[in-house]
Amino acid sequence: MDGFYSGGFDGIDSDDVGSGFDTSDVSIDNSTDLGDIFDGGSDVASLDTDADVSVDFDDAGTETLFSLDDFTAESFDDISVSDVDSVPDEIVTPSLEDRTIHELETLRDSLGLGDGDSDVEQLAGRYKDIKGIEISGEVGEAHHIIPQSIVDQNKEIETAILLEKQDHRELPTTGGIINRTYEPFLPDSPENMRHRDEIKALIDDGQYAEAFRNEVLEIQKNAYDKGEEGKYDAAIRQAIDTEIDYIKEYGVPKTK
């Protein structure tokens, strides 16, 4: 343990140290008293290479600091670079697709989704497959989770969820913020446009899953505010799974 020590123990002689430990190999400045180091501890237990290093704190009990079992001064000599796990030449960053899929899977598993309202058709999928389907005794509306006016994709194959007409028209992306009667030919309200700008900004920043999550929460919140918590839960789970499959096939949608 050469180089580990210079000087001696102030107030401690060699009789306090057990066999197998040379005081000339211990590094503590001459001006330092072990009693000061250990807050008034007065005695040091015997030390040898087959025992634990410990300190007696004024007879209040002995606390083991570390073990010297099987340790020798040559132990350091045996350490080589080959003992260190290899470090990769470069850190592999997940692709946008892999990261987004992982985030959507995490979203699906963290929402605590139930089976939804048994009196309401629970359906989501590609827009072309669910548009025009009845829900609650009337033709429902297929709602694009991410508005088709934002992403540069074929709206027919984008992910959509089947909603009751009134629920669809109360959502921010369809102008629900100002409770207007939704008609496709009407101009967007300023509130509606700002909401869509927020979605676009997230997607452009590589946070597609976050944008998708926010729109899912809007559907849940709208139902919750009307005392219908969990109304579309099963359909939301289908929508997330549909979006994951979409990304696997086409990649993460980009904005127009």
Image (cartoon, rainbow, N blue to C red):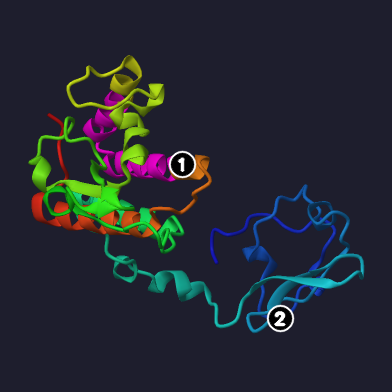
Residue 29 percent coordinates (x, y): 71, 50
- In the picture of the structure, the residue carrying the numbered disc 1 is 221
Viewer-proximal residue among 87 and 162: 162
Predominant SS of the magenta segment? helix
Image height of 228 relative to 202, above or below: below
Apparent side of residue 20 relative to residue 101 in the rendered image (left or right)? right
What residue is drawn where x is 67% and y is 74%? 21
Q: Neighbour class for label 2 at 10 Å: few (<14), some, many (≥20)? A: few
Say which of marks 2 and 1 sits in front.
1
Residue 222 percent coordinates (x, y): 44, 40
| Residue 137 circle label | none
Viewer-proximal residue among 56 and 137: 137
Q: Earlier in the sequence, mark 2 or mark 1?
A: 2
Farthest residue in the front direction? Answer: 137
Amino acid on which disc 1 is placed = Lys
Residue 212 on the magenta span: yes
What residue is drawn where x is 68% and y is 79%? 48
Residue 198 on the magenta span: yes
Residue 1 percent coordinates (x, y): 55, 67
Viewer-proximal residue among 168 and 110: 168
| Residue 19 circle label | 2
Image height of 71 relative to 8, above or below: below
Amino acid on which disc 2 is placed = Ser
To which quarter of the image does residue 79 belong? bottom left
Which stretch appears magenta?
196-222
Determine the secondary structure under disc 2: loop
